[in-house]
Image (tube, rainbow, N blue to C red):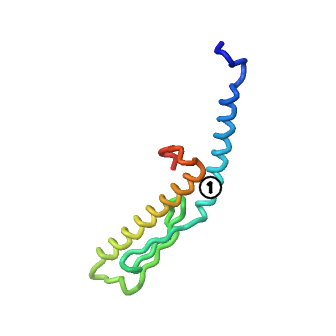
Protein backbone atom coordinates (compact mmCIF):
# COMPACT_ATOMS: atom_id res chain seq x y z
CA UNK A 1 0.00 0.00 0.00
CA UNK A 2 1.33 3.43 -0.90
CA UNK A 3 2.45 5.68 1.91
CA UNK A 4 -0.38 7.93 3.16
CA UNK A 5 -3.20 5.82 1.66
CA UNK A 6 -4.96 4.17 4.57
CA UNK A 7 -8.03 2.74 2.91
CA UNK A 8 -9.57 6.10 2.00
CA UNK A 9 -9.21 8.93 -0.39
CA UNK A 10 -6.14 11.01 0.37
CA UNK A 11 -6.87 14.52 1.68
CA UNK A 12 -5.90 16.29 -1.52
CA UNK A 13 -7.97 13.92 -3.66
CA UNK A 14 -11.01 14.31 -1.40
CA UNK A 15 -10.68 18.07 -1.59
CA UNK A 16 -10.35 17.88 -5.36
CA UNK A 17 -13.52 15.79 -5.59
CA UNK A 18 -15.44 18.36 -3.50
CA UNK A 19 -14.22 21.15 -5.76
CA UNK A 20 -15.25 19.19 -8.87
CA UNK A 21 -18.74 18.59 -7.44
CA UNK A 22 -19.10 22.27 -6.58
CA UNK A 23 -17.97 23.25 -10.08
CA UNK A 24 -20.47 20.81 -11.60
CA UNK A 25 -23.31 22.38 -9.58
CA UNK A 26 -22.22 25.85 -10.66
CA UNK A 27 -22.11 24.76 -14.31
CA UNK A 28 -25.63 23.33 -14.11
CA UNK A 29 -26.89 26.56 -12.56
CA UNK A 30 -25.09 28.59 -15.23
CA UNK A 31 -26.64 26.50 -18.02
CA UNK A 32 -30.11 27.26 -16.63
CA UNK A 33 -29.30 30.97 -16.47
CA UNK A 34 -27.84 31.00 -19.99
CA UNK A 35 -31.03 29.47 -21.36
CA UNK A 36 -32.78 32.68 -20.25
CA UNK A 37 -30.12 35.13 -21.46
CA UNK A 38 -30.22 36.30 -25.06
CA UNK A 39 -27.95 37.94 -27.59
CA UNK A 40 -29.00 39.88 -30.66
CA UNK A 41 -27.35 40.25 -34.05
CA UNK A 42 -28.33 42.17 -37.15
CA UNK A 43 -27.41 42.12 -40.82
CA UNK A 44 -28.03 44.55 -43.63
CA UNK A 45 -28.02 47.59 -41.38
CA UNK A 46 -30.83 46.20 -39.24
CA UNK A 47 -32.83 44.69 -42.10
CA UNK A 48 -32.66 41.28 -40.38
CA UNK A 49 -32.42 40.81 -36.62
CA UNK A 50 -31.86 37.46 -34.91
CA UNK A 51 -32.14 36.73 -31.19
CA UNK A 52 -30.51 33.60 -29.75
CA UNK A 53 -30.16 32.30 -26.22
CA UNK A 54 -27.19 30.80 -24.40
CA UNK A 55 -28.27 27.32 -25.45
CA UNK A 56 -27.69 28.43 -29.06
CA UNK A 57 -31.38 28.29 -29.84
CA UNK A 58 -32.77 30.90 -32.22
CA UNK A 59 -35.61 32.57 -30.35
CA UNK A 60 -36.67 35.23 -32.83
CA UNK A 61 -36.05 36.46 -36.36
CA UNK A 62 -37.30 39.87 -37.47
CA UNK A 63 -37.24 40.92 -41.12
CA UNK A 64 -37.98 44.50 -42.12
CA UNK A 65 -40.68 44.50 -44.81
CA UNK A 66 -38.72 46.76 -47.17
CA UNK A 67 -35.95 44.14 -47.51
CA UNK A 68 -38.35 41.52 -48.86
CA UNK A 69 -37.90 41.61 -52.64
CA UNK A 70 -39.48 38.68 -54.49
CA UNK A 71 -36.99 39.25 -57.31
CA UNK A 72 -33.99 38.95 -54.95
CA UNK A 73 -34.73 36.17 -52.49
CA UNK A 74 -31.05 35.23 -52.46
CA UNK A 75 -30.10 38.53 -50.81
CA UNK A 76 -32.64 37.96 -48.04
CA UNK A 77 -31.34 34.44 -47.49
CA UNK A 78 -27.78 35.80 -47.22
CA UNK A 79 -28.87 38.43 -44.68
CA UNK A 80 -30.65 35.81 -42.58
CA UNK A 81 -27.61 33.50 -42.65
CA UNK A 82 -25.29 36.35 -41.69
CA UNK A 83 -27.49 37.42 -38.77
CA UNK A 84 -28.00 33.84 -37.53
CA UNK A 85 -24.28 33.05 -37.67
CA UNK A 86 -23.43 36.27 -35.83
CA UNK A 87 -26.05 35.57 -33.15
CA UNK A 88 -24.66 32.07 -32.61
CA UNK A 89 -21.11 33.47 -32.43
CA UNK A 90 -22.26 35.94 -29.77
CA UNK A 91 -24.02 33.14 -27.87
CA UNK A 92 -20.74 31.18 -27.90
CA UNK A 93 -18.87 34.19 -26.54
CA UNK A 94 -21.45 34.61 -23.77
CA UNK A 95 -21.19 30.93 -22.79
CA UNK A 96 -17.38 30.96 -22.87
CA UNK A 97 -17.28 34.12 -20.76
CA UNK A 98 -19.55 32.58 -18.13
CA UNK A 99 -17.61 29.31 -18.15
CA UNK A 100 -14.38 31.22 -17.63
CA UNK A 101 -15.84 32.68 -14.44
CA UNK A 102 -16.55 29.21 -13.08
CA UNK A 103 -13.49 27.33 -14.26
CA UNK A 104 -11.10 30.19 -13.60
CA UNK A 105 -9.45 29.68 -16.95
CA UNK A 106 -8.56 26.06 -16.21
CA UNK A 107 -8.68 25.41 -19.94
CA UNK A 108 -11.32 22.73 -20.07
CA UNK A 109 -11.91 22.43 -23.83
CA UNK A 110 -15.02 20.96 -25.31
CA UNK A 111 -17.23 21.35 -22.28
CA UNK A 112 -19.70 23.50 -24.22
Quadrant in the picture for residue 5: top right
Residue 92 against residue 83 in the figure, above or below: above
Residue 89, percent from left and from top:
44, 61
Residue 24 against residue 7 in the figure, above or below: below
Q: Is residue 85 left or right of residue 95?
A: left
Residue 44, percent from left and from top:
36, 78
Residue 34 or residue 8, whichever sits in front: 8
Residue 78 against residue 92 in the figure, above or below: below
Residue 86, percent from left and from top:
41, 66
Q: Residue at x 47, y 74 (%)?
A: 61
Q: Residue at x 45, y 75 (%)?
A: 49
Residue 25, percent from left and from top:
67, 47
Mark 1 Cα-neighbour bin, 10 Å: few <14, some 14–19, many ≥20:
some
Q: Residue at x 66, y 40 (%)?
A: 19
Q: Residue at x 32, y 71 (%)?
A: 78
Quadrant in the picture for residue 41: bottom left
Residue 112 or residue 107, whichever sits in front: 107
Residue that badge 1 annotates: 30
Amino acid sequence: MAKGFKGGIPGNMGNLMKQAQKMQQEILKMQEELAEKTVEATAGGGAVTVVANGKKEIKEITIQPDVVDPDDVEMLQDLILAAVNEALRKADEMVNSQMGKITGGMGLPGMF
